[in-house]
Amino acid sequence: MQRIVSKDNEIIKHAKKLKDRKYRKQHGEYIIEGIKLIKEAIQENVEIEQIIICESCEKTEIIPKEIIYNLAKKECILVPEKIFENITGVVNPQGILAIVRMDEKKQEINYDEDIIIALDNIQDPGNLGTIIRTVDSVGLTQIFVSKGTVDAYNEKVIRSTMGAIFRVKIIECENLQEDLQKLKKHKFEVLVTSLQTNKSIYDIKYSKKVIVIGNEANGVSEEIQKLADKKIKIPMLRKNRKLKCICCNRSYFV
């Protein structure tokens, strides 16, 4: 394991610069942090360039043994606490982070899927992370994001995905409108979320559909709405709504 004690070391400077979106895109790398995310990255065979470990973390033996076994196969760097604090984006870090390579294949569109999610200028990192996590939880594998959407490789987004970022394609669109038109040529219907309709997201037959979710404050842009085939809304489930379990047929309220 290599030990670095200087903040001017090129690897340390490179890791710090990866906080910048433009630099991340230029180098095709991003940072993940914490035991859970690194464990998920190893399980998903993500390409890890380097793993940086804080000396105090190594001494306290906080890293599980199964991860230590896998770390032996990677390039690991040990740094003093002060240098690690210079790199980390977490208030109370666990003392371990990794530089990970972006998967270029994840920019290839899979036209065989029935449902694709598209995001039009989502701004909040937590919201984007939650959407990625939700998409992963229902078995979808790709999301289109507009140029104005917060960077999916932002450290706050990465943390809030809880590992889903490794399984979901994030397809960055220079022009979301043009990419949606391409999807329409492949027999996809474009649905935009809107309050100006009575049609619910639960009323749709999901076969070859693109669901466009808009900006938190302004919704889906006017240009995207014009090319949409349908408008739908996502209703809030109120506490007094009665639902029936499809497994046991028991009624309950949410």
Image: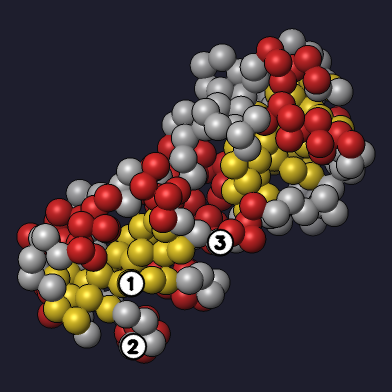
Pointer 3 local density, CA inside 10 Å: few below 14, some 14–19, many at least 20: some
Image quarter for residue 181?
top right
Q: Which residue is mark 3?
A: 103
Q: Earlier in the sequence, mark 1 or mark 3?
A: 1
Give the image location of residue 105, x and y in percent. Answer: 64, 61
The three-letter code of the residue at mark 1 reads: Gln
Residue displayed at 81% across by 36% down: 182
The three-letter code of the residue at mark 2 reads: Ala
Mark 3 lies on a secondary structure that is: loop
**Residue 12 higher or lower than 217, as above or below:** below
Q: Using residue 124 as the reference point, say whether residue 10 is left or right of it.
A: left
Report the quarter where the N terminus lies. Answer: bottom left
Image quarter for residue 193?
top right
Q: Which mark is residue 72?
A: 2
Q: Which residue is mark 1?
A: 50
Is residue 29 or residue 190 the one in the foreground?
29
Pointer 2 local density, CA inside 10 Å: few below 14, some 14–19, many at least 20: few
Give the image location of residue 89, x and y in percent. Answer: 25, 50
Residue 86 visible in this rendered orientation of the protein: yes
Residue displayed at 46% across by 63% down: 101
**Residue 244 higher or lower than 66, as above or below:** above
Residue displayed at 36% across by 64% down: 99
Instruction: Judge depth for marks 3 and 2 and give the one in front.
Output: 3
